[in-house]
Image (spheres, rainbow, N blue to C red):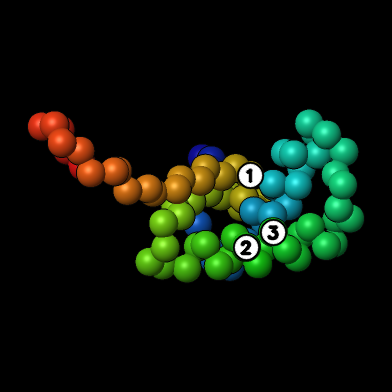
């Protein structure tokens, strides 16, 4: 179907839409303590920076013809050195 979401890697250009999703998600839990334009600007810049290639953050979006409707974020971390026989 043409309205089914397409899952794809997020790009820096997606940051404004992702910031709006973040605001909507968190505002359902508790009223924001920061005004909306300031948060969207700050969050968009943070997300765009993290979505540049080479960093430890990864994100994917569920994209539809109407726009991005969902997202998942992952932070890659290094495992500490280990003295036993298991992967680091």
Tell which circle, 2 or 1, labels the residue nearer the N-terminal end: 2
Tell which circle, 3 or 1, labels the residue nearer the N-terminal end: 3
Q: Which residue corresponds to the image point at 41% horizontal and 67% vertical from the top-left?
A: 53
Residue ID for mark 2: 46
Identify which residue, 21 or 57, lies in the foreground.
57
Q: Are marks 2 and 1 in contact (CB under 8 Å)?
A: no
| Mark 3 surroundings: few (<14), some (14-19) or many (≥20) residues within 10 A | some
Q: Are marks 2 and 3 in contact (CB under 8 Å)?
A: yes
Is 56 left, or right, of 78 in this rendering? right
Is 40 left, or right, of 10 in this rendering? right
Looking at the image, how many numbered discs can be counted on the residues? Answer: 3
| Mark 1 surroundings: few (<14), some (14-19) or many (≥20) residues within 10 A | some
Q: Which residue corresponds to the image point at 47% horizontal and 68% vertical from the top-left?
A: 52
Identify which residue, 67 or 84, lies in the foreground.
84
Q: Could you say which disc has been placed on residue 43 in the image?
A: 3
Q: Are marks 3 and 1 in contact (CB under 8 Å)?
A: no
Task: State the CA–CA distance, disc 2 to disc 1.
Answer: 20 Å
Task: State the CA–CA distance, disc 2 to disc 3.
Answer: 5 Å
Q: Which residue corresponds to the image point at 69% horizontal and 47% vertical from the top-left?
A: 21
Q: In this rendering, which labeled residue sits more in front, label 2 or label 1?
A: 2
- Give x and y (percent) for residue 24: 76, 42
Q: In this rendering, which labeled residue sits more in front, label 3 or label 1?
A: 3
Looking at the rendered image, the quarter that the C terminus falls into is: top left
Q: Secondary structure at mark 1?
A: strand
Residue 70 placement: quadrant: top right
- Give x and y (percent) for residue 22: 69, 46
Task: State the CA–CA distance, disc 3 to disc 1.
Answer: 17 Å
Residue ID for mark 1: 69
As displayed, is residue 17 above or below residue 88? Answer: below
């Amino acid at each position: 179907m043409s309205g089914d979401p397409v899952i794809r890697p997020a790009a820096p250009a997606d940051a404004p839409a992702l910031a709006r999703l973040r605001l909507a998600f968190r505002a359902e839990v508790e009223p924001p303590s920061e005004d909306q334009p300031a948060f969207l600007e700050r969050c968009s810049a943070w997300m765009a920076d993290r979505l540049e290639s080479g960093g430890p953050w990864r994100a994917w979006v569920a994209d539809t013809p109407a726009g991005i409707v969902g997202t998942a974020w992952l932070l890659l971390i290094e495992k500490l050195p280990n003295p036993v026989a298991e992967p680091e």
